[in-house]
Image (spheres, rainbow, N blue to C red):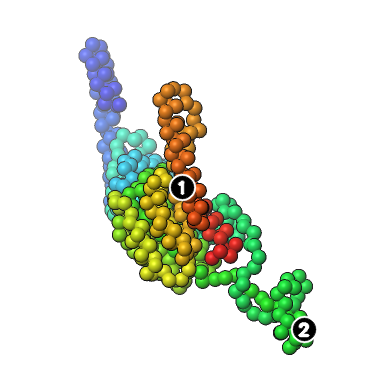
Amino acid sequence: MALTGFILLFITAYLVPALFAPVKLALAVLAAVLVLEAVLLFRGRSSVFARREVPDRLSNGDDNPLTIYLESRYPFRVHLEVIDEIPVQFQKRDVLFQAALNPNETTAIRYELRPIRRGEYGFGALNIYVMTPLRLLKRRFQFSQDKQVAVYPSFLQMRQYELLAITNRLTELGIKKVRRIGHSMEFEQVRAYTRGDDVRTINWKATARRSDLMVNAFQEEKSQAVYCLIDKGRVMKSPFEGLSLLDYAINASLVLSNIALLKQDRAGLMTFSEKIGQTVVAERRPGHMQKILEVLYRQKTRFLESDYEALYTSVRTHIRQRSLLLLFSNFETVNALHRQLPYLRRLAKDHLLIVVFFENTELRSLLDGPADSTEAIYQKTIAEKFYYEKKLIVKELQQYGIQTILTAPQHLTADTVNKYLELKARGMI
């Protein structure tokens, strides 16, 4: 801008020669200021320090906090522009921050990144551009902050549910309070009767021996096996808010497995597509949650139709005890369900099976909107048909005694945990 102004002044001085000398003097002053600013800016090699703080791993689908620490060692106030080279997966080149620092002052810039794919992410350098208050020159400092970070399934969501479960505040995340029906029949001990105990639990033989009322005490049934069966076929490739349905299923499985372990149950996992993937036997031991997390981290969507016959064979081979099976898949039509229904019925015969599949939220928004043209009427009619198919799938499965969860992707985790707690309260597992 200054040079453009001088060009215009010199053109004017050509017409008015009296301006020529003052313009040359002003240009000389500008050159002197530039030299002085260059000396002030470029003296010293470490006049600015910067460091990026990144977690060792990022949580998929969540806002992950990052911090950039800046320190100025200049003896005067400086203005900074910070350009962070974030991983290419985010497809963002506008991560630009501005700050102003006084002499020997430090500051922190905090921002968030939301990854939508699992895998390795590479951070690049930190580029710091420093200017004096005149802002005529910039000096670039580049700090090599190269770092490889793994993006894991949503462990932040898992920790949130874990914390609220420990403090009995799960209702804040949409988890319903379910009244326990009856009591568990897992015997714990015989103890003395106290006022308020159920008289139906009186142990008459122990009462006769002790000459005092004794009752049987029961405890909540524990060590039940809970398996998440995750479909990796092409039906789970559909995207929603950047994440695929497979990623939503993986995040929900991680949270549910952790809640099951907190409830003293055993958590297991099985993935499948056109062939059986990895299997984690249901256990409850130290480090088991980390094992499940590592397995879920490596899962990828396949592009073939899933083989439910292979799933049934594998479940029958590896899961001998009656267990709770949560099958994460997606069915768009009743015909698609009918192809797999025989295998689902066989699974439900030996285990408590819950089929979890997804609402098409785009259809829901289309149905709620107005139809103001002939084309919109046809689109809404077709949407009604697909929406009705989902309801038919639920009815068809319930007809054969198979539990279902039809949910929007963003509500998957809460609805799945709700169903697990409901079945546990009813003593069905």
* Residue furthest left in the image: 14
Point out the image quarter for the N terminus: top left
Q: What element carries label 1?
A: helix
- Residue placed most toward the observer, 364 or 116: 364
For badge 2, the amino acid type reads: Asp
Image vertical order of residue 265 relative to residue 418, above or below = below
Tags 2 and 1 touching, CB below 8 Å: no
For badge 1, the amino acid type reads: Ile
**Mark 1 neighbour density, 10 Å: few (under 14) some (14–19) many (20 or more):** many
Residue identifier under label 2 = 212
In x, y percent, where is residue 265? 51, 68
**Relative horizontal placement of residue 171, taking residue 2 as reference (left or right):** right
- Residue placed most toward the observer, 82 or 228: 228
- Residue placed most toward the observer, 218 or 8: 218
Q: Give me the C-alpha separation between circle 2 and circle 1.
A: 57 Å
* Circle 2 or circle 1, nearest the eye: 1
Quarter of the figure with residue 240: top left
| Residue 151 can be seen, yes or no | no
- Label placed on residue 321: none
In x, y percent, where is residue 249? 42, 54
Q: Which residue is drawn at 31% across and 43% down?
A: 91
Earlier residue among tags 2 and 1: 2
Instruction: Tally the numbered discs.
Output: 2
Q: Residue at x 72, y 73 (%)?
A: 200
**Relative horizontal placement of residue 394, taking residue 2 as reference (left or right):** right
In x, y percent, where is residue 8? 26, 18
**Mark 2 neighbour density, 10 Å: few (under 14) some (14–19) many (20 or more):** few
Residue identifier under label 1 = 393
Q: Which residue is drawn at 77% across and 73% down?
A: 195
Image vertical order of residue 369 relative to residue 322, above or below = above
Quarter of the figure with residue 184: bottom right
- Residue placed most toward the observer, 90 or 342: 342
